[in-house]
Image (tube, grey):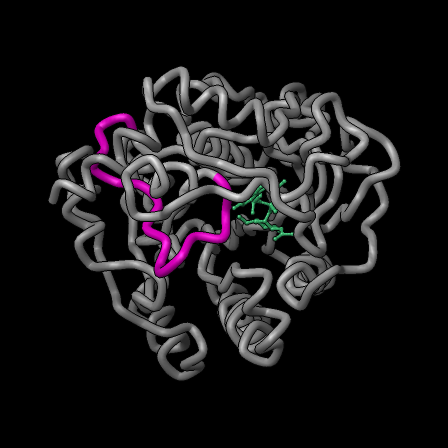
Amino acid sequence: MSKILVTGGLGFIGSHTVVELQNEGYDVVIIDNLSNSSRDVLQGIIGITGKEPVFEELDLRDKQGVQNFFKTHSDINGVIHFAASKAVGESVGNPLLYYENNINTLIYVLQELDKLKDANFIFSSSCTVYGQADELPITENAPVKPAESPYGNTKQIGEEIIKDSCKVIPNLNAIALRYFNPIGAHESALIGELPIGVPLNLVPFITQTAAGLREQLSVFGDDYPTSDGTCVRDYIHVVDLAKAHVIALKRLLEAKNKSNFEVFNLGTGTGSSVLEAIKSFEYVSGEKLNYKIAPRREGDVVAAYADTEKANQELGWTSELTLDDAMRSAWKWEQKIRNK
Ligand code: UD1
């Protein structure tokens, strides 16, 4: 069976993807530096799949370490590269950390791929590359807008670096997956999102407020030109997202890709407002959420949701789980970690 390297495999999306890979019979090797994750996640993965992935604690900024890793694991058939920093605000305050973490590490991994027989590469990109798109839903052909933050810039530059590498590394085939807003947790509540400190993203803030860790959720702005005045996003269940990675990988392993660098949006195609997300949470949890309307947050786009046609038709992937499913699983996970 194919052996797949998952960098950042103990993180939020990474761990869910490891589960789906192992469920499909792949042998998985995880690299993670535990900077925003925990070794305990391995127990969750084993609990769900009954199988222990190989785990190497390694910081990908350690170039020599990366070279040594690929010498030992020269039989890898594919790489899913999640390892990166992802806090927008932090990236504004510490851009060089973001360029080092997200760009240097990408380069070090790509530099080793010409030594592999099968250099199949999946990259975590983001809908942030579109900025505020002129047309909704957003297709993959929508122009990439100047990045609003160093974090967003690392996703744009990352895609460019991979595209250029595909022109010169003969056996390299890559897919960049542009995620919309990943939320939720595995239905077993054995793995989920583990934000460090005060969450910046909506759903962990909602569940932590309901769990009593936060006083009140601030809804950032209710005067946007949307149906109820709050921002609209495409919230995609992390398990659906994880499955898309396995499908994308298979596409490369079976050489079904149309070019050696492809891009796909991963979203549900449905936009939900912040107030709709809160309603969904309240419905599935039976909890009343304490929230207030607050000023707009700087840098927020008004609305973003995916045109899913290309992912549906070309990749053969469609999201299956709903916003309610995602909220239910996020709430189950929050309750589980609070009762630990
Ligand atoms: C953010 C990043 C995006 C990144 C993604 C990673 C920004 C501007 N964008 O997306 O680049 O890829 O996270 O997960 O930071 N909201 C509230 N109150 C809160 C938190 C959020 O009202 O306490 C609202 C926001 O205004 C937004 C929506 O909820 O309308 C979703 O916010 P969030 O979960 O932070 O995701 P994005 O900002 O869409």
Q: Describe residue 242's horizontal placement relative to residue 318 as left or right.
A: left
Q: Describe residue 112's horizontal placement relative to residue 175 as left or right.
A: left
- The quadrant of the image that shows the N terminus is top left
The image shows residue 211, relative to residue 295, as above or below, that is above
Q: Where is residue 214 drawn, in percent x and y?
A: 36, 48
User: In this view of the protein, can residue 261 be seen by the observer?
Assistant: yes
The image shows residue 256, relative to residue 317, as above or below, that is below
Q: Where is residue 301 drawn, in percent x and y?
A: 74, 44
The image shows residue 4, relative to residue 309, as above or below, that is below
- The quadrant of the image that shows the C terminus is top left
Q: Residue 34 or 24: which is nearer the viewer?
A: 34
Looking at the rendering, which quadrant does residue 74 occupy?
bottom left
Q: What stretch is highlighted in magenta?
A: 187-202
Q: Where is residue 96 drawn, in percent x and y?
A: 60, 80
User: In this view of the protein, can residue 166 be seen by the observer?
Assistant: no
Q: Residue 144 or 93: which is nearer the viewer?
A: 93
Q: What residue lies at 40% left-to-right and 84% top-to-bottom? A: 64
Looking at the rendering, which quadrant does residue 8 occupy?
bottom left
